[in-house]
């Protein structure tokens, strides 16, 4: 194994770790239902405040509001968006193998899972233009990631057969 192979393995390990961290943090977004809101609980973990009679009281107790919801979304997604850009840069440089293609597919699959929750948050906060703008930006970025990945696959025929999720 030469130093180039070691660099590729290290690059993959770095991105896999980032993806797993993001997936652990953002997984709760898959469970959002209509009318639910997000926040942090007493243990400072991200959580869902289900639509119920006491939702407002619980959010008040934990000092949660629309502004905090936007802050939480930034906490969850800001580093992840840089991660996506970095993945595409590495993938575009042909510095990847099958494991990297699988990592891209896993990112896209996870994005699809949390998009439903994000769309429901948009419905809940339909009057909040800042929150709507941020979520729309996420949706556009996810779509661009899929499109860019597909384009890279088309230009790199050797990867085409391996990239069955997007292509």
Image (cartoon, rainbow, N blue to C red):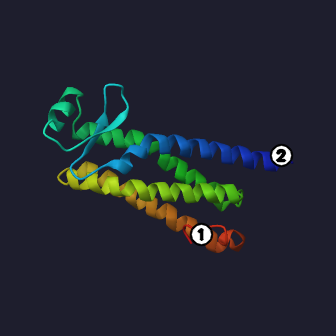
| Residue 93, position as x, y percentages in the image | 69, 59
Tag count in the figure?
Answer: 2
Q: Nearer the viewer, residue 69 or 85?
A: 69
> Eyeballing the image, is 97 above or below 73?
below
Label number found at residue 3? 2
Q: Which residue is drawn at 55% across and 67% down?
A: 165
| Residue 125, position as x, y percentages in the image | 21, 50
> Eyeballing the image, is 83 above or below 42?
below
Q: Which of 69 and 53 is in front in this view?
A: 53
Label number found at residue 124? none
| Residue 105, position as x, y percentages in the image | 56, 60
Image quadrant holding the C terminus, namely: bottom right
Q: Residue at x 71, y 61 (%)?
A: 94
> Eyeballing the image, is 11 above or below 41?
below
Label 1 element class: loop
How packed mark 2 is, by other alpha carbons closer than 10 Å (few <14, some 14-19, many 20 or more), is: few
| Callouts 1 and 2 close, C-beta under 8 Å | no
Write down the residue under mark 1: 164
Seen as rendered, the residue at the extreme right is: 1
Q: Nearer the viewer, residue 68 or 160?
A: 160
Q: In this view, does 113 lie to the left or right of 33?
A: right
The residues bearing labels 1 and 2 have C-alpha atoms spaced at a distance of 30 Å
Q: Residue at x 30, y 37 (%)?
A: 39
Which circle's residue, 1 or 2, is located before the other in the chain?
Answer: 2
Q: Which of marks 1 and 2 is in front?
A: 1
Q: In this view, does 25 lie to the left or right of 6?
A: left
Q: Is residue 118 left or right of residue 106?
A: left
| Residue 108, position as x, y percentages in the image | 50, 59
How packed mark 1 is, by other alpha carbons closer than 10 Å (few <14, some 14-19, many 20 or more), is: few
């Amino acid at each position: 194994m030469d130093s180039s192979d070691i660099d590729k393995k290290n690059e993959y390990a770095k991105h896999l770790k980032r993806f797993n961290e993001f997936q652990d943090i953002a997984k709760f977004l898959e469970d959002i239902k209509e009318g639910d809101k997000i926040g942090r609980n007493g243990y400072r973990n991200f959580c869902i405040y289900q639509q119920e009679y006491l939702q407002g009281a619980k959010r008040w107790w934990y000092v949660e509001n629309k502004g905090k919801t936007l802050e939480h979304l930034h906490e969850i997604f800001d580093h992840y968006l840089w991660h996506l850009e970095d993945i595409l840069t590495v993938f575009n440089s042909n510095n990847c193998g099958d494991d990297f293609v699988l990592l891209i597919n896993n990112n896209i699959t996870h994005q699809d899972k949390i998009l439903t929750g994000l769309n429901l948050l948009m419905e809940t906060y339909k009057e909040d233009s800042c929150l709507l703008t941020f979520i729309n930006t996420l949706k556009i970025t996810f779509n661009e990631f899929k499109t860019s990945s597909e384009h890279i696959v088309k230009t790199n025929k050797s990867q085409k057969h391996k990239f069955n999720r997007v292509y």
